[in-house]
Image (spheres, grey):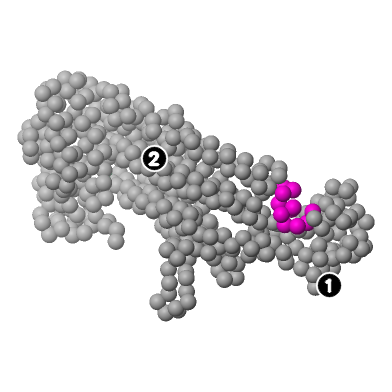
Amino acid sequence: MKDNGNTPHTTPPPQVLWGGRLEEKPEAEAFAFQASINVDRRLARDDIAGSRAHVIMLGQRGIIPAETAAALDRELARIAGELEAGTLTVDPGAEDIHSFIEGLLTDRLGDAGRMVHAGRSRNDQVAVDLRLYLKRTVPELVGELTGTIRALLDRAEEQAAAVMPGYTHLQRAQPVTAGHHLTAWGTALERDRSRFFDALTRLDECPLGAGALAGSGLPLDREATAKALGFARPTLNAMDSVADRDFALELSAACAITMIHLSRFCEDVVIWASEEFKFINLAESWSTGSSIMPQKKNPDFAELIRGKAGRTTGNLVTLLTLLKGLPYAYDKDLQEDKESLFDSLDTVRVCLRMFRGMMETLVFNRERMEAACIGGFLEATDAAEYLVRRGLPFRKAHETAALLVRDCIQGGQRSIVERSLPELKARSKLFEADVYQALSPASCVAARKLPGGPAPGEVQRQIGVLRKKLENPDHDGSSGNRA
Ligand code: ARG
């Protein structure tokens, strides 16, 4: 269950960073409602990294004493270590991760701790934390994406000659191969991968020093903190730095698009696994049974991934709606950005892993797939093209092939090649004995060797192109490293 950060706490509100101005503090429930610790606790590492860069710069600039800066840096490193080791846990009663870390520094170092926030606001702090978090975790997600594309391409290579019906309107259309179909999926996911890279490249600017919205009068060194944190550069405009979340939107959209792709692939898997199609057999370990119907083997994993595309679509709409009409610069509404974004990133990650496992283990039923190429007149387009190659205008060839299909339906034949040569010639004198060979499903596929086509050699070439693109590193978090 998701924790919206509004779980009532019975303990009184903890120390806050804004205690000076307000004599009366919100009641416990109200305090918990506006707190964000349950969501932003996952930014702890990033908040500490940002603070370390900040205090070091404050020391270098003489804004705080050098020894204070060193002490703060040491303590921040210690806190990071303790959190990592589990000897320190984030206080769920804190207002947010920024207050928690600053509170610890003050508790441990006294006045030195009170110096850390000079020239900084939680508004630029949270913007830095979120970008750092994304720079370190999105490449991991992209790694899952890369692994999943590779798994699809491996299967595509193996099934490059496995003839199956291609569909339009979910009606049998033309023979293709399982390799062609899987490569189509890989091509789409490779574009998703580049969408994540694009977003990472654009978000690679450091908001630190933007303050609440208007920068700082202190002589901060924004270049230095940006560099220390591994950003390409500082952000250009302080107000934009704290007000916008378009980088979160882009990533949320990349997640939503990836999930929409997976939902379509999973729909194909569900259809293929049905008794009616039986093109594939899902591994038992990637299926589930029924509590009442003893015979059932259900494609639950595919269905659940398909279903989870709803969450990521919803999360994108949440974020768009959150930002729509929001006055500049920072508004507390922006606190709601993280939960939906984190949920989308988590969802895509686990779905990619599950989809990959399912795809790696399913077995293609090549006989069923090939048999399904007969009976739906999938060769009709090739029959028309046979005639075009012999000089007939396409529209006439199309009509001739259509008449042949009608002849077959009337004569009870399941394929054009089940008619005799004289019967074919009665429709067009251009038909010769070689038509029988030309219209077999494998020949139809082999003939489509144009770039993009399903011919086995051409699909191998497409796979090679995609594999080459995947050789680009999964983004090192710095700019200028696009796929
Ligand atoms: N928890 C806040 C957020 O996620 C941090 C910034 C708070 N700033 C403020 N002015 N209340 O956006």
**Residue 118 at what x, y percent from top left?**
18, 30
Image quadrant where residue 167 sits: bottom right
Give the amino acid type for the residue marked by disc 1 in the picture.
Answer: Gly
The residue pinned by badge 2 equals 139
The prevailing secondary structure element of the residues shown in magenta is helix
Q: Within 8 Å: ligand 1 and the Cβ of disc 1?
A: no
At horizontal 41% and vertical 52% (from top left) the residue drawn is 353
Element under disc 1: helix
Element under disc 2: helix
| Magenta segment includes 15 | no
The Cα atoms of the two marked residues, 2 and 1, are separated by 60 Å
**Residue 64 at what x, y percent from top left?**
14, 24
Residue 395 shows in this picture? no
Give the residues in magenta: 438-448
At horizontal 16% and vertical 20% (from top left) the residue drawn is 62
Q: Between 87 and 224, which is closer to the camera in this rendering?
A: 87
At horizontal 55% and vertical 40% (from top left) the residue drawn is 466
Give the amino acid type for the residue marked by disc 2 in the picture.
Answer: Pro
314 vs 163, left or right, is left
How many numbered marks does the figure carry? 2
The residue pinned by badge 1 equals 411
